[in-house]
Every structure is written in C-alpha cells, then in structure tokens.
Amino acid sequence: MSDTNDKELVAGHPPAVKAGGSRHGQHRRNSENEKISSNEIKKEEQEYGSDPKPDRNSDVILSGAVGKGDKDFTPQAVKQFHEKPIPSKEKRPVQQTHHINQPR
C-alpha cells in the first residue's frame, strides 16, 4: 500500500480512516508549519515589540470596589466557607413500599 503523500488527495485532504465501524477524519498535524526559529522570534519582537509582562500588583475589582486579592479573603476564611457542617443527627432513608400492579 502506498503512503498518503503518494495517494491522490480528494478535495485537498486524505481519505477518512475507518475505526470502530465508522469513518473518521484524520487529525491535522501542522507541526511543520508552526516551527519558528529563535531568530524569527527576535525579529518579530524588534518589529512589533515584545508582549507586555503581567503586572503582579494588579488590582481586582469586586462589585465595583477594588479588591486586595488574598488580603480580602484569607485562605482560612475560604476554607471555613467551603466546609460543610457536620449534621448532629443522621438522616435515615425513608422506607417506601413498592406496589407492583399485576393482573390476576
């Protein structure tokens, strides 16, 4: 059997693969096109400028008020909020009798 490059492509893509009793299209692998050398990256940074670095002290706005991150909600307060209270009494499941209506 010949390779997919040797086969004639229909509509610009390779034929579907049969797996599990049905035909599926193959995943496209564009790794060849995505490889960019470090020189090209440096040229792009010089031409367009590098990405802005994220500000570590950025303020968070909560409901219109400026938040202080972890200072507003300490890890202990968040943990206490998310913990479920332990019930004092155990809930027992309700016993339901199932009636099956059958003809006589």
Image: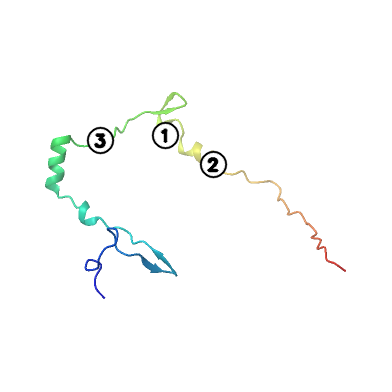
Display coloring: rainbow
Looking at the rendered structure, the kind of residue marked 1 is Asp
Mark 3 vs 1, N-terminal side: 3
The CA span between labels 2 and 1 is: 16 Å
The CA span between labels 3 and 1 is: 21 Å
The CA span between labels 3 and 2 is: 33 Å
Q: Quadrant of residue 65?
A: top left
Secondary element type, mark 1 = helix
Mark 3 vs 2, N-terminal side: 3
Spot occupied by residue 33 in the image (x, y as percentages of width and height)? 21, 53
The disc at residue 53 is 3
Mark 3, Cα crowd under 10 Å, few <14 / some 14-19 / many 20+, is few
Spot occupied by residue 74 in the image (x, y as percentages of width and height)? 46, 35
Looking at the rendered structure, the kind of residue marked 2 is His
Residue behind mark 2: 82
Task: Check contact, mark 3 vs mark 2: CB within 8 A.
Answer: no
Mark 2, Cα crowd under 10 Å, few <14 / some 14-19 / many 20+, is few
**Residue shown at the point (76%, 54%) measured from the top left:** 94
Looking at the rendered structure, the kind of residue marked 3 is Lys
Spot occupied by residue 101 in the image (x, y as percentages of width and height)? 82, 63
Task: Check contact, mark 2 vs mark 1: CB within 8 A.
Answer: no
Residue behind mark 1: 70
| Nearer to us in this view, 30 or 9 | 9
Task: Check contact, mark 3 vs mark 1: CB within 8 A.
Answer: no
**Residue shown at the point (47%, 26%) measured from the top left:** 63
